[in-house]
Image (cartoon, rainbow, N blue to C red):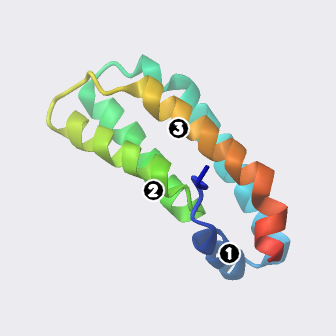
Amino acid sequence: MNSMVDWSRVKDLRSEVGSDDFEEVIAMFLEETDAVIAGITKAKSTKSLESELHFLKGSALNIGLASFARLCQQGEKAASSGILSVDLDEIVQAYWRSRNDLLAQLSSQVAA
């Protein structure tokens, strides 16, 4: 199975923030993203859904979750066109797969 994580971006992020702050940045990303993911299915309007997907996309790109970011971008585009029936289950599942992949391989990938 291919990684859902762009490890070169993760390594770049580590270089940008420094190894001392890197784990804190990862933890903060996951905490904020977990909260948005938990509430995303409750979006009441296309505008709020678009905003949440935009946030998720940006966060995902910053941390190297490229596959997840693409799904968020597609959903964001649909919501901006007034479509509320975005496949949120697919987005949520992609997040958890990406998150698990990131955490499972983080120490070995950034040490390489």
Q: Position of residue 32 (x, y in %)?
A: 62, 43
Callouts 1 and 3 close, C-beta under 8 Å: no
Q: Earlier in the sequence, mark 1 or mark 3?
A: 1
Q: Which residue is mark 3?
A: 94
State the SS at label 3.
helix
Disc 2 crowd, CA 10 A, few/some/many (<14, 14-19, 20+): some
State the SS at label 2.
helix
Q: Quadrant of the C terminus?
A: bottom right
State the SS at label 1.
helix
Q: Is residue 55 above or below residue 46?
A: below
In this view, the mark in front (1 or 2)? 1
As measured in the structure, the alpha-carbon distance from the residue carrying label 1 to the one carrying label 2 is 17 Å
- Residue name at image x 57 percent, y 52 percent: 4
Asked whether, in this view, residue 2 is left or right of residue 31, the answer is left
- Residue name at image x 65 percent, y 68 percent: 10
Q: Earlier in the sequence, mark 1 or mark 2?
A: 1
Asked whether, in this view, residue 91 is left or right of residue 3, the answer is left
Residue 21 is tagged as none
Q: Is residue 38 above or below residue 51?
A: above
Location of residue 109 by image quarter: bottom right
Q: Which residue is mark 2?
A: 58
Q: Earlier in the sequence, mark 3 or mark 2?
A: 2
Q: Which residue is mark 1?
A: 11
Q: Is residue 12 above or below residue 98?
A: below
Q: How many marks?
A: 3
**Amino acid marked by disc 3:** Ala
Q: Position of residue 20 (x, y in %)?
A: 85, 73
Asked whether, in this view, residue 3 is left or right of residue 53, the answer is right
Q: Position of residue 65 (x, y in %)?
A: 55, 55
Asked whether, in this view, residue 2 is left or right of residue 28, the answer is left
- Residue name at image x 76 percent, y 50 percent: 103
**Amino acid marked by disc 2:** Gly
